[in-house]
Amino acid sequence: MNSTPVIIDSKPVSFVIGEGALKHSKRLLKKFPRMIVLVDDNVRKYCLPVFEEFLNEFEFSGVVEIRSGEGFKNIEQSIDIWQALTDLKVDRDALLVNLGGGVVSDIGGFVAATYKRGIQFINFPTTLLGMIDAAIGGKTGVDFSGFKNQVGLFTDPIAVIVDPVFLKTLESVEWQSGYAEVIKYALIMDRDLWRMLDGKSYKEVEEWNKIIIKAAKDKIDIVRYDTHEKGIRKNLNFGHTIGHAFESFFLKTATPITHGKAVAAGMICESWISSQLYGEDCVLLPEIEGMIDKSFDRLDIQEKHIPEFMELMRHDKKVREGKLQFSLIKKIGKAVHNIEVDNPMVINSIKYYIHQSISS
Ligand SMILES: NC(=O)c1ccc[n+]([C@@H]2O[C@H](COP(=O)([O-])OP(=O)(O)OC[C@H]3O[C@@H](n4cnc5c(N)ncnc54)[C@H](O)[C@@H]3O)[C@@H](O)[C@H]2O)c1
Ligand SMILES: [Zn+2]
Protein backbone atom coordinates (compact mmCIF):
# COMPACT_ATOMS: atom_id res chain seq x y z
CA MET A 1 0.00 0.00 0.00
CA ASN A 2 1.28 3.45 -0.91
CA SER A 3 0.60 5.81 1.98
CA THR A 4 0.99 9.53 2.10
CA PRO A 5 2.44 10.97 5.26
CA VAL A 6 1.08 14.01 7.04
CA ILE A 7 3.24 17.08 6.47
CA ILE A 8 3.23 19.96 8.94
CA ASP A 9 5.48 22.69 7.60
CA SER A 10 5.50 24.77 10.73
CA LYS A 11 8.24 27.09 11.97
CA PRO A 12 10.78 26.40 13.29
CA VAL A 13 10.27 22.65 12.83
CA SER A 14 8.87 20.73 9.87
CA PHE A 15 7.17 17.44 10.59
CA VAL A 16 6.59 14.55 8.24
CA ILE A 17 4.61 11.81 9.97
CA GLY A 18 3.41 8.41 8.88
CA GLU A 19 4.17 5.72 6.32
CA GLY A 20 6.14 7.17 3.42
CA ALA A 21 7.81 9.84 5.57
CA LEU A 22 11.33 8.65 4.77
CA LYS A 23 10.82 9.18 1.05
CA HIS A 24 9.47 12.66 1.72
CA SER A 25 12.54 13.60 3.73
CA LYS A 26 14.67 13.63 0.60
CA ARG A 27 13.88 17.20 -0.36
CA LEU A 28 15.07 18.34 3.05
CA LEU A 29 18.26 16.33 3.02
CA LYS A 30 19.23 17.62 -0.41
CA LYS A 31 20.00 21.01 1.13
CA PHE A 32 22.95 19.72 3.11
CA PRO A 33 26.43 19.28 1.67
CA ARG A 34 27.47 17.00 4.56
CA MET A 35 25.46 14.69 6.77
CA ILE A 36 26.56 12.66 9.75
CA VAL A 37 24.31 9.95 11.18
CA LEU A 38 24.17 9.28 14.92
CA VAL A 39 22.97 5.82 15.96
CA ASP A 40 23.27 3.42 18.87
CA ASP A 41 24.42 -0.18 18.46
CA ASN A 42 20.92 -1.64 18.04
CA VAL A 43 19.84 1.07 15.67
CA ARG A 44 22.95 0.57 13.58
CA LYS A 45 22.05 -3.09 13.25
CA TYR A 46 18.29 -2.81 12.72
CA CYS A 47 17.51 0.65 11.35
CA LEU A 48 20.56 2.00 9.55
CA PRO A 49 20.25 -0.53 6.70
CA VAL A 50 16.59 0.50 6.17
CA PHE A 51 17.53 4.17 6.33
CA GLU A 52 20.37 3.76 3.82
CA GLU A 53 18.25 1.71 1.47
CA PHE A 54 15.49 4.34 1.35
CA LEU A 55 17.98 7.15 0.94
CA ASN A 56 20.49 5.37 -1.28
CA GLU A 57 21.13 8.38 -3.49
CA PHE A 58 22.67 10.26 -0.56
CA GLU A 59 26.16 9.91 0.67
CA PHE A 60 26.67 10.18 4.38
CA SER A 61 30.04 11.49 5.52
CA GLY A 62 30.12 9.42 8.64
CA VAL A 63 28.22 7.24 11.07
CA VAL A 64 28.82 7.87 14.75
CA GLU A 65 27.77 5.04 17.04
CA ILE A 66 27.03 5.27 20.74
CA ARG A 67 26.22 2.53 23.19
CA SER A 68 22.50 1.86 23.66
CA GLY A 69 20.53 2.40 26.82
CA GLU A 70 19.66 5.11 29.32
CA GLY A 71 22.87 4.35 31.24
CA PHE A 72 24.84 5.86 28.36
CA LYS A 73 22.84 9.07 28.01
CA ASN A 74 25.63 10.94 29.76
CA ILE A 75 28.26 13.60 29.35
CA GLU A 76 31.06 11.07 28.72
CA GLN A 77 29.24 9.79 25.68
CA SER A 78 28.58 13.39 24.56
CA ILE A 79 32.34 13.98 24.69
CA ASP A 80 32.85 10.93 22.48
CA ILE A 81 30.40 12.35 19.92
CA TRP A 82 32.01 15.82 20.00
CA GLN A 83 35.35 14.07 19.46
CA ALA A 84 34.02 12.01 16.55
CA LEU A 85 32.58 15.12 14.89
CA THR A 86 35.91 16.88 15.38
CA ASP A 87 37.83 13.92 13.91
CA LEU A 88 35.49 13.92 10.92
CA LYS A 89 36.20 17.67 10.54
CA VAL A 90 32.49 18.40 10.66
CA ASP A 91 31.74 22.04 9.98
CA ARG A 92 28.84 24.28 10.84
CA ASP A 93 27.11 23.71 7.51
CA ALA A 94 26.78 19.99 8.23
CA LEU A 95 23.63 18.22 9.38
CA LEU A 96 23.45 15.73 12.23
CA VAL A 97 20.90 13.00 11.61
CA ASN A 98 19.66 11.55 14.89
CA LEU A 99 18.50 8.08 13.96
CA GLY A 100 17.23 6.25 17.03
CA GLY A 101 15.05 6.27 20.09
CA GLY A 102 14.74 8.92 22.77
CA VAL A 103 18.28 8.40 24.01
CA VAL A 104 19.74 9.20 20.58
CA SER A 105 17.51 12.24 19.99
CA ASP A 106 18.10 13.60 23.51
CA ILE A 107 21.89 13.30 23.41
CA GLY A 108 22.14 14.02 19.68
CA GLY A 109 20.17 17.25 19.98
CA PHE A 110 22.30 18.32 22.92
CA VAL A 111 25.55 17.59 21.11
CA ALA A 112 24.37 19.26 17.90
CA ALA A 113 23.30 22.41 19.75
CA THR A 114 26.66 22.74 21.49
CA TYR A 115 29.15 21.57 18.84
CA LYS A 116 30.74 24.69 17.31
CA ARG A 117 27.93 26.71 18.94
CA GLY A 118 25.33 24.73 17.09
CA ILE A 119 24.84 22.71 13.95
CA GLN A 120 21.49 21.78 12.50
CA PHE A 121 19.93 18.40 13.17
CA ILE A 122 16.98 16.26 12.13
CA ASN A 123 15.34 13.60 14.27
CA PHE A 124 14.40 10.29 12.67
CA PRO A 125 12.83 8.45 15.63
CA THR A 126 12.93 4.65 15.52
CA THR A 127 10.98 3.72 18.68
CA LEU A 128 7.28 4.22 19.35
CA LEU A 129 8.17 6.50 22.28
CA GLY A 130 10.54 8.49 20.10
CA MET A 131 7.93 8.88 17.36
CA ILE A 132 5.13 10.19 19.53
CA ASP A 133 7.07 11.89 22.29
CA ALA A 134 10.85 12.17 22.68
CA ALA A 135 11.75 13.41 19.19
CA ILE A 136 9.14 16.18 19.36
CA GLY A 137 9.24 19.30 21.49
CA GLY A 138 12.83 20.51 21.63
CA LYS A 139 13.90 19.11 24.99
CA THR A 140 17.42 17.71 24.76
CA GLY A 141 20.04 16.72 27.27
CA VAL A 142 21.80 14.06 29.27
CA ASP A 143 21.56 12.51 32.71
CA PHE A 144 24.08 13.75 35.27
CA SER A 145 25.08 12.89 38.81
CA GLY A 146 22.24 10.40 39.23
CA PHE A 147 19.52 12.75 37.97
CA LYS A 148 17.64 12.29 34.74
CA ASN A 149 17.97 15.06 32.14
CA GLN A 150 19.95 17.19 34.59
CA VAL A 151 22.03 18.96 31.91
CA GLY A 152 20.59 20.09 28.61
CA LEU A 153 18.70 22.73 26.70
CA PHE A 154 15.66 23.46 24.62
CA THR A 155 16.73 23.38 21.00
CA ASP A 156 14.73 22.54 17.93
CA PRO A 157 15.65 20.20 15.12
CA ILE A 158 14.89 21.58 11.69
CA ALA A 159 12.65 18.58 11.10
CA VAL A 160 11.24 15.46 12.65
CA ILE A 161 10.63 12.57 10.26
CA VAL A 162 8.39 9.89 11.74
CA ASP A 163 8.28 6.73 9.64
CA PRO A 164 6.83 3.60 11.27
CA VAL A 165 8.88 1.46 8.87
CA PHE A 166 11.53 1.21 11.59
CA LEU A 167 9.21 -0.34 14.13
CA LYS A 168 9.29 -3.84 12.63
CA THR A 169 12.28 -4.77 14.78
CA LEU A 170 11.19 -3.06 18.00
CA GLU A 171 10.97 -5.34 21.03
CA SER A 172 7.64 -5.94 22.69
CA VAL A 173 8.66 -4.24 25.93
CA GLU A 174 9.46 -1.04 23.98
CA TRP A 175 6.07 -1.12 22.25
CA GLN A 176 4.47 -1.45 25.64
CA SER A 177 6.47 1.43 27.08
CA GLY A 178 5.50 3.78 24.25
CA TYR A 179 1.88 2.71 24.48
CA ALA A 180 1.57 4.23 27.96
CA GLU A 181 2.21 7.65 26.42
CA VAL A 182 -0.32 6.95 23.64
CA ILE A 183 -2.95 6.23 26.30
CA LYS A 184 -1.87 9.41 28.08
CA TYR A 185 -2.54 11.62 25.02
CA ALA A 186 -5.99 10.06 24.68
CA LEU A 187 -6.76 10.76 28.33
CA ILE A 188 -5.45 14.33 28.49
CA MET A 189 -6.59 15.71 25.16
CA ASP A 190 -7.89 13.34 22.54
CA ARG A 191 -11.21 11.53 22.89
CA ASP A 192 -11.01 10.49 19.22
CA LEU A 193 -7.77 8.70 19.94
CA TRP A 194 -9.42 7.04 22.96
CA ARG A 195 -12.14 5.76 20.64
CA MET A 196 -9.55 4.56 18.11
CA LEU A 197 -7.72 2.61 20.82
CA ASP A 198 -11.07 1.02 21.61
CA GLY A 199 -9.90 -0.58 24.84
CA LYS A 200 -7.22 -2.58 23.02
CA SER A 201 -3.90 -3.67 24.44
CA TYR A 202 -0.73 -2.69 22.59
CA LYS A 203 -0.60 -6.25 21.27
CA GLU A 204 -4.04 -5.97 19.70
CA VAL A 205 -3.63 -2.63 17.94
CA GLU A 206 -3.51 -2.92 14.16
CA GLU A 207 -3.80 0.64 12.93
CA TRP A 208 -0.43 1.83 14.19
CA ASN A 209 0.14 4.28 11.38
CA LYS A 210 -3.05 6.20 12.20
CA ILE A 211 -2.43 6.06 15.92
CA ILE A 212 1.14 7.31 15.62
CA ILE A 213 0.02 10.19 13.42
CA LYS A 214 -2.70 11.15 15.91
CA ALA A 215 -0.48 10.92 18.98
CA ALA A 216 2.46 12.74 17.37
CA LYS A 217 0.11 15.55 16.28
CA ASP A 218 -1.18 15.81 19.85
CA LYS A 219 2.34 16.36 21.15
CA ILE A 220 3.08 18.87 18.37
CA ASP A 221 -0.09 20.80 19.24
CA ILE A 222 0.85 21.07 22.89
CA VAL A 223 4.49 22.09 22.47
CA ARG A 224 3.63 24.57 19.76
CA TYR A 225 1.60 26.60 22.27
CA ASP A 226 3.89 26.12 25.23
CA THR A 227 7.44 25.11 24.37
CA HIS A 228 8.91 26.01 27.74
CA GLU A 229 6.30 24.30 29.91
CA LYS A 230 4.79 27.40 31.48
CA GLY A 231 1.24 26.14 31.15
CA ILE A 232 -0.49 23.63 28.93
CA ARG A 233 2.64 21.50 28.34
CA LYS A 234 2.36 20.56 32.01
CA ASN A 235 -0.67 18.48 31.04
CA LEU A 236 1.83 15.99 29.60
CA ASN A 237 2.87 15.24 33.18
CA PHE A 238 -0.36 13.38 33.81
CA GLY A 239 0.56 10.04 35.39
CA HIS A 240 4.15 11.16 35.79
CA THR A 241 4.19 12.65 39.31
CA ILE A 242 3.42 9.34 40.99
CA GLY A 243 4.82 7.41 38.00
CA HIS A 244 8.28 8.94 38.40
CA ALA A 245 8.32 7.91 42.06
CA PHE A 246 7.60 4.31 41.03
CA GLU A 247 10.28 4.50 38.33
CA SER A 248 12.93 5.83 40.76
CA PHE A 249 11.93 3.29 43.40
CA PHE A 250 12.44 0.34 41.05
CA LEU A 251 15.62 1.83 39.64
CA LYS A 252 17.24 1.12 43.00
CA THR A 253 16.14 -2.53 42.96
CA ALA A 254 17.45 -5.49 40.98
CA THR A 255 14.40 -5.22 38.72
CA PRO A 256 14.09 -1.72 37.22
CA ILE A 257 10.90 -1.07 35.25
CA THR A 258 10.36 0.81 32.00
CA HIS A 259 9.19 4.39 32.03
CA GLY A 260 5.95 3.26 30.40
CA LYS A 261 5.14 0.72 33.11
CA ALA A 262 5.73 3.36 35.76
CA VAL A 263 3.58 5.92 33.96
CA ALA A 264 0.80 3.38 33.40
CA ALA A 265 0.65 2.75 37.15
CA GLY A 266 0.90 6.49 37.82
CA MET A 267 -2.03 7.13 35.50
CA ILE A 268 -4.22 4.72 37.46
CA CYS A 269 -3.36 6.51 40.74
CA GLU A 270 -3.83 9.95 39.24
CA SER A 271 -7.08 8.94 37.54
CA TRP A 272 -8.32 7.82 40.95
CA ILE A 273 -7.41 11.24 42.40
CA SER A 274 -9.15 12.87 39.42
CA SER A 275 -12.28 10.82 40.06
CA GLN A 276 -12.28 11.89 43.72
CA LEU A 277 -11.97 15.57 42.79
CA TYR A 278 -14.12 15.76 39.69
CA GLY A 279 -16.58 12.92 40.16
CA GLU A 280 -16.61 9.26 39.20
CA ASP A 281 -19.29 9.88 36.58
CA CYS A 282 -16.98 12.26 34.71
CA VAL A 283 -13.68 10.48 35.00
CA LEU A 284 -14.92 6.92 34.27
CA LEU A 285 -12.23 5.24 36.33
CA PRO A 286 -13.23 1.61 35.59
CA GLU A 287 -12.95 2.23 31.85
CA ILE A 288 -9.49 3.79 32.25
CA GLU A 289 -8.26 1.05 34.58
CA GLY A 290 -9.59 -1.62 32.23
CA MET A 291 -7.69 -0.08 29.34
CA ILE A 292 -4.40 0.19 31.24
CA ASP A 293 -4.65 -3.23 32.88
CA LYS A 294 -4.98 -4.85 29.47
CA SER A 295 -1.43 -3.83 28.57
CA PHE A 296 0.27 -3.54 31.94
CA ASP A 297 0.50 -5.94 34.88
CA ARG A 298 0.15 -4.25 38.26
CA LEU A 299 3.47 -3.30 39.84
CA ASP A 300 4.67 -5.38 42.74
CA ILE A 301 4.41 -2.70 45.42
CA GLN A 302 3.11 -2.76 48.97
CA GLU A 303 1.71 -0.29 51.50
CA LYS A 304 4.98 -0.30 53.43
CA HIS A 305 6.68 1.32 50.41
CA ILE A 306 4.34 4.32 50.36
CA PRO A 307 6.51 6.58 52.60
CA GLU A 308 9.39 6.08 50.18
CA PHE A 309 7.18 6.98 47.21
CA MET A 310 6.07 10.15 49.03
CA GLU A 311 9.69 11.07 49.75
CA LEU A 312 10.63 10.56 46.10
CA MET A 313 7.73 12.78 45.04
CA ARG A 314 8.84 15.53 47.41
CA HIS A 315 12.17 15.54 45.60
CA ASP A 316 10.40 15.93 42.29
CA LYS A 317 10.20 19.43 40.86
CA LYS A 318 6.41 19.54 40.96
CA VAL A 319 6.23 20.73 44.56
CA ARG A 320 5.10 24.24 45.52
CA GLU A 321 5.12 25.42 49.12
CA GLY A 322 5.39 21.82 50.28
CA LYS A 323 2.31 20.68 48.38
CA LEU A 324 2.42 18.32 45.45
CA GLN A 325 1.25 19.74 42.14
CA PHE A 326 -0.56 17.44 39.75
CA SER A 327 -1.83 17.39 36.21
CA LEU A 328 -5.16 15.59 36.36
CA ILE A 329 -8.08 14.80 34.09
CA LYS A 330 -11.59 16.20 34.43
CA LYS A 331 -12.87 13.60 31.99
CA ILE A 332 -11.41 11.46 29.23
CA GLY A 333 -9.83 13.92 26.80
CA LYS A 334 -9.59 16.94 29.13
CA ALA A 335 -6.67 17.69 31.44
CA VAL A 336 -5.98 20.40 34.00
CA HIS A 337 -2.65 21.34 35.56
CA ASN A 338 -1.20 23.01 38.68
CA ILE A 339 -3.67 21.19 40.92
CA GLU A 340 -2.54 20.94 44.53
CA VAL A 341 -3.35 17.61 46.12
CA ASP A 342 -3.04 16.86 49.83
CA ASN A 343 -0.73 14.06 50.87
CA PRO A 344 -3.47 11.81 52.34
CA MET A 345 -5.22 11.73 48.99
CA VAL A 346 -1.98 10.84 47.20
CA ILE A 347 -1.39 8.07 49.72
CA ASN A 348 -4.92 6.77 49.25
CA SER A 349 -4.50 6.72 45.49
CA ILE A 350 -1.54 4.35 45.87
CA LYS A 351 -3.52 2.22 48.33
CA TYR A 352 -6.29 2.11 45.77
CA TYR A 353 -3.81 0.99 43.12
CA ILE A 354 -2.57 -1.79 45.38
CA HIS A 355 -5.94 -3.07 46.64
CA GLN A 356 -8.47 -1.69 44.11
CA SER A 357 -10.05 -0.08 47.15
CA ILE A 358 -8.80 2.08 50.00
CA SER A 359 -10.56 0.40 52.90
CA SER A 360 -8.13 -2.49 53.42
N1 LIG B 1 13.04 14.98 24.97
C1 LIG B 1 11.85 14.62 25.35
O1 LIG B 1 10.87 15.37 25.28
C2 LIG B 1 11.65 13.22 25.85
C3 LIG B 1 10.35 12.73 26.07
C4 LIG B 1 10.20 11.41 26.49
C5 LIG B 1 11.32 10.63 26.72
N2 LIG B 1 12.57 11.15 26.51
C6 LIG B 1 13.78 10.35 26.73
O2 LIG B 1 13.75 9.27 25.81
C7 LIG B 1 14.48 8.18 26.34
C8 LIG B 1 13.67 6.92 26.15
O3 LIG B 1 13.42 6.76 24.76
P1 LIG B 1 13.23 5.31 24.13
O4 LIG B 1 12.20 4.59 24.89
O5 LIG B 1 13.08 5.52 22.67
O6 LIG B 1 14.61 4.60 24.52
P2 LIG B 1 15.93 4.19 23.71
O7 LIG B 1 16.39 5.25 22.80
O8 LIG B 1 16.88 3.73 24.76
O9 LIG B 1 15.44 2.95 22.84
C9 LIG B 1 15.01 1.78 23.47
C10 LIG B 1 15.77 0.56 22.98
O10 LIG B 1 15.36 0.23 21.67
C11 LIG B 1 16.45 0.13 20.79
N3 LIG B 1 15.94 0.47 19.48
C12 LIG B 1 15.67 1.71 19.00
N4 LIG B 1 15.03 1.62 17.82
C13 LIG B 1 14.91 0.31 17.54
C14 LIG B 1 14.30 -0.41 16.48
N5 LIG B 1 13.64 0.23 15.50
N6 LIG B 1 14.38 -1.75 16.49
C15 LIG B 1 14.98 -2.41 17.52
N7 LIG B 1 15.53 -1.77 18.57
C16 LIG B 1 15.49 -0.43 18.58
C17 LIG B 1 17.50 1.01 21.38
O11 LIG B 1 18.79 0.65 20.98
C18 LIG B 1 17.28 0.78 22.87
O12 LIG B 1 17.94 -0.39 23.27
C19 LIG B 1 14.75 8.52 27.80
O13 LIG B 1 16.09 8.90 27.93
C20 LIG B 1 13.83 9.69 28.09
O14 LIG B 1 14.36 10.56 29.06
C21 LIG B 1 12.74 12.42 26.08
ZN1 LIG C 1 6.75 10.01 29.88
Image: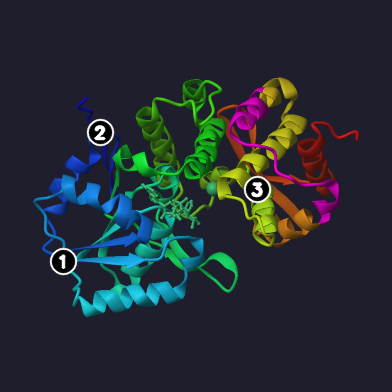
* Classed neighbour count for the residue bearing mark 3: other residues with Cα under 10 Å, few (<14), some (14–19), many (≥20): many
- Residue drawn at the location 20% of the way across and 73% of the way down: 90
Q: Could you tell me the amino acid type at mark 2? A: Pro
Q: Could you tell me the amino acid type at mark 3? A: Gly
Q: Which mark is residue 243?
A: 3
**Residue at mark 1 to residue at mark 2: CA–CA distance:** 28 Å
* Classed neighbour count for the residue bearing mark 2: other residues with Cα under 10 Å, few (<14), some (14–19), many (≥20): many
The answer to whether mark 1 and mark 3 are in CB contact below 8 A is no
Q: Which residues are magenta?
A: 287-307
First of labels 1, 3 by sequence position: 1
Provide residue 47's location: percent of width, then percent of height.
29, 50
In the rendered image of this protein, does residue 131 appear above or below residue 283?
below
Q: Could you tell me the amino acid type at mark 1? A: Ser
Q: Ligand 2 closer than 8 Å to the CB at disc 3? A: yes
Residue carrying label 2: 5
Assign the N terminus to one quadrant of the image.
Answer: top left
Provide residue 126's location: percent of width, then percent of height.
35, 47
Residue carrying label 1: 61
In the rendered image of this protein, does residue 351 appear above or below residue 308?
above
